[in-house]
Image (cartoon, rainbow, N blue to C red):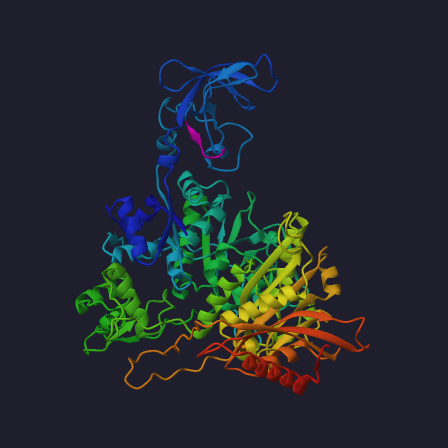
Amino acid sequence: MKFTLSWLKQHLDTAASRDALAEALTACGLELEAIEDPAVTLGAFVIGHVVACEQHPNADKLRVTKVDFGAGEPVQVICGAPNARLGMKGVFAPSGTYVPGTDMTLKPTKIRGLESRGMLCSERELLLSDAHEGIIDLPEDAPVGTRFVDYAGLDDPVFDIAITPNRQECLGVRGIARDLAAAGLGTLKPEAPVALADESGPAAPRVTLAFPEGQAPGCAHFLLRRVSGVANGAGPDWLVQRLKAVGAKPISALVDVTNFMTLDRARPLHVFDAAKVRGDLVVRPAAPGETLDALDDTTYTLHGGEVVIADDTGVISLAGVIGGKSTGVDETTTDVLVEAAWFDPVRTAETGRAHDIMTDARYRFERGVDPASTAPELDRACRMIVDLCGGTPGPVSAAGQAPGAPAPVRFRPERVASLGGVDVAPDTAKRILADLGFSVDDSAGVPWTVAVPSWRPDVDGEADLVEDVLRIHGYDHIPSTPLPRTADGVAQPTLTLAQKRTRRVRRRLAAEGLSEAITWSFVDRGLAEAFGGAPADLAVTNPISSDLDQMRPSILPHLCDAARRNIDRGQDCVGLFEVGPQYQDASPAGQRLVAAGLRAGRTGGRHWRDRPRDVDLFDAKADALAALAEAGAKVDAVQTLATAPDWYHPGRSGSLCLGPKTVLAVFGEVHPTLVKRFDIKAPVVAFEVYLDAIPAPKAKKAKKGAATGGATKPALLLSNLPSVERDFAFVVAADVPAQDLVRAAAGAERQTITDVRLFDVYQGEGLDPGEKSVALSVVFEPRERTFTDDEIAALSERVVAAVAKATGGRLRG
């Protein structure tokens, strides 16, 4: 929302400085985003007089001019504008001036061999408009040497504030002025109701609200007045300048009045050319297939159910959103129909979203326009039209009635302290509420009965009134209070287990050489079907893009797409991961927290010592195990099964499980058909770790007499005795998983065996078909004394026996 200082002062009687107003706006909850001060950005531009103008000897489209700008001798300026001529006055930028429209600082230069010291400027170069066909041509009486901003009245700061959805009344300058007055920055100027002295003109067409019984009406109140005999043309300078200053485009006096009312009063209006309207008006739901040629030069085909305004020819306006070209006003308009209505916020928002239309009217109607303003602001707009364009207003044609004011709220002044932490005197709270337009009745004592003004539909409880008192009193008055400390002075941890796991896993995967990606939680429906399914309850009803119309069942589609873009740009080693939600259905249990990642291309970089290789499923498995270990899973107890979802290669993938049912992660090569679908010209492996499936660690009880407040860690046991490493080669059936041998060997003597590693697998000569040799390295670590040879032999025999029992394997001869 933009407004100028002079515009604000039309409603606020204040002597506050620009900076004081800026500080008060943010303190009131109207966050200031920027102040545009033309006096600063355009202060160096002055009025210049062209005292000489000749054809450039070396260029057909250039002229050599001399410009007097009131600073001594005229300077030579090379100008290419077609309207440059002797005797004209324009806007001149001397050398050293920064030109905002071109983002350039002028300096003396030569153009086609002749020196140029400055520039005669167009409106676009001063960011006044998009006009750049010629330079600004000022009247003959423009004073030479005067700052252009002073001459043109541009020395008016423009405030740009952010409006939260619950502050719809501040989408008009008067609402902003009311807040500042309540905050003590001045006095809100009183206004008397506008009266139309003459209403003898012809009546407006009859209006009917036609909504099916049982359906919520899309329009509760509709007023229409005809003003006859108007002369439409350019608006007055003050109105044009005010609209231009805040970025609104002046069109004609009639349209400018409606735009002014939208910005000044947060009250959108619309004007129809009465001669182009056929018959009476009906406000109704649209029928499927109806069309509207709108004022934005777009033809909209309606889905059905949108609230529209129609005459005998069909739809002439999308109610509260945009009007139609067929009834638009132009310079030939002599009779105008002025519409003021209250449209349902939800229906208005649905219509705008369905057709991707965002207008100032929709922006305000979907947030809730003051229902009590319909009639008085229609009178105000018609009075402006009569004053600017002439004409005679007629009686109002009305349909429906305005919604009632919000219900009164019971308010206890002491709740400001208990909810907001600030002691505000009851008299101060009462004064603030009254200044904001509330009516306070404290005759019956506490609680007070507070009548809510019609422009505050967001207020429906005591907490809302507390918020208003707090923000006007000043959020800076809320004291900074530290959180309470425990008895031992150590703050208790605040992160949940899921938050801790997420942070640890992100750091670990980054340490493994993967780069973190942040992608959409939406995906194309076709890809969703390929990566787990696309149930109807996860379809996005209002997607931001046609290819993002389904909640993602997997993070991998976006990572694959990102990998393709990186490979297409010359990256031969791509590693990406993301930690975020995946969705199986619309229930809370259907959302899973997943750490997903992929590697594509080759491993490592170019180096004479280490030869790169293509990534394989073991790289993905290593990443998954690293993530599981960092998340607190007992990796030693994890089993690897040769099962994985359909989007993985059926023979080069697997899952990491705790038992047969609890799947902690899946990994493997991405299915070749999907690699081809993404057009990735490199091998791709991926993993998905289901962080929610990892069992929570068991809380450890503190020992008797130990300090409480957290779980204790076990004592660190380190042996100062030499460990012993022995190698075993077992012959087993070819279909026996090597993991079974590792698990059996590790369980042969848990107190002594500290590590078991697989280091070789062999099939071929010397073994029967259907057999393989699996070589393990087992580490024995003594606890009390060094092992003897007999003890080592006994431990080795236990390992052999355990493997034989679990797998049927025998030592290789």
Visible residue check, residue 487: yes
Q: Is the residue 307 above or below the residue 728 in the image?
A: above
Question: Residue 196 location in percent, x, y?
Answer: 38, 54
Question: Residue 740 location in percent, x, y?
Answer: 65, 80
Q: Is residue 311 magenta?
A: no
Q: Is the residue 600 above or below the residue 538 in the image?
A: above
Question: Residue 202 location in percent, x, y?
Answer: 50, 56
- The residue range painted magenta reads 97-102
The quarter of the displayed image where residue 478 is located: bottom left
Q: Is the residue 644 above or below the residue 16 in the image?
A: below
Magenta: main secondary structure equals loop
Residue closer to the observer: 767 or 684: 767
How many dots with numbers? Answer: 0
Residue closer to the observer: 100 or 491: 491
Indicate left or right for 656 with 457 as reference.
right
Q: Quadrant of the C terminus?
A: bottom right
Question: Residue 504 location in percent, x, y?
Answer: 47, 66
Residue closer to the observer: 487 or 190: 487
Q: Residue at x 46, y 51 (%)?
A: 258
